[in-house]
């Protein structure tokens, strides 16, 4: 089995993104972006990839908001 730096639509995806470390979430984000780039290159975008990327972006935004909130009150 060769390793890929993309997360294809048929590969498993975490049920709860809040359980991932920041690094794991960033890697997942990167893999999804690479997959989306590949799909665009072949004019074959998948709804699953975009949906997953939306979920990851929501979690990243949530973490940014928490981080920014803590910085204000430190």
Image (tube, rainbow, N blue to C red):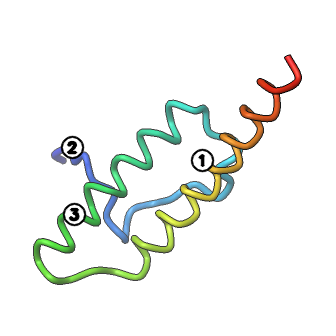
Task: Judge from the rendering whether residue 51 lies leftward or rightward of residue 44; answer left or right.
Answer: right
Q: CA distance from mark 2 to mark 1?
A: 25 Å
Judging from the image, what secondary structure is the residue with disc 3 in? helix
User: In this figure, which residue is indicated by the disc labeled 1?
Assistant: 60
Q: Is 64 left, or right, of 12 in this rendering?
A: right
Mark before the other along the chain sequence, 3 or 1 = 3
Q: Badge 3 is on which residue?
A: 37
Identity of the residue furthest to the front in this view:
72
In the rendered image, the residue lying farthest to the right is 73
Separation (CA) of disc 3 from disc 2: 17 Å
Q: Residue at x 27, y 80 (%)?
A: 45
Q: Residue at image x 44%, y 47%?
A: 28
| Residue at the spot 51% in from the left edge and 59% down from the top edge | 13
Residue 19 or 29: which is nearer the viewer?
29
Rate crowding at label 2 as few (under 14), some (14 to 19) or many (20 or more) other CA atoms within 10 Å: few
Picture layout, residue 66 above or below residue 37: above
> Mark 2 — residue?
3
State the SS at label 1.
helix
Residue 4's tag is none
Q: Are marks 2 and 1 in contact (CB under 8 Å)?
A: no
Q: Quadrant of residue 35?
A: bottom left
Label 3 to label 1: alpha-carbon separation: 20 Å
For discs 3 and 2, the disc positioned in front in the rendered view:
3
Residue at (57%, 32%) from the top-left corner? Answer: 22
Residue 71 image offset from top left, x and y in percent: 77, 24
For the residues carrying marks 2 and 1, which lies nearer the camera in this image? 1
The residue furthest left is: 42
Left or right relative to 51: residue 43: left
Q: Position of residue 40 (x, y in %)?
A: 19, 74
């Amino acid at each position: 089995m060769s390793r890929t730096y993309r997360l294809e639509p048929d590969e498993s995806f975490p049920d709860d993104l809040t359980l991932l470390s920041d690094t794991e979430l960033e890697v997942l984000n990167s893999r999804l972006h690479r997959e989306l780039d590949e799909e665009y290159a072949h004019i074959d975008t998948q709804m699953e990839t975009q949906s997953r990327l939306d979920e990851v972006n929501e979690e990243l935004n949530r973490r940014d908001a928490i981080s920014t909130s803590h910085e204000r009150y430190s």
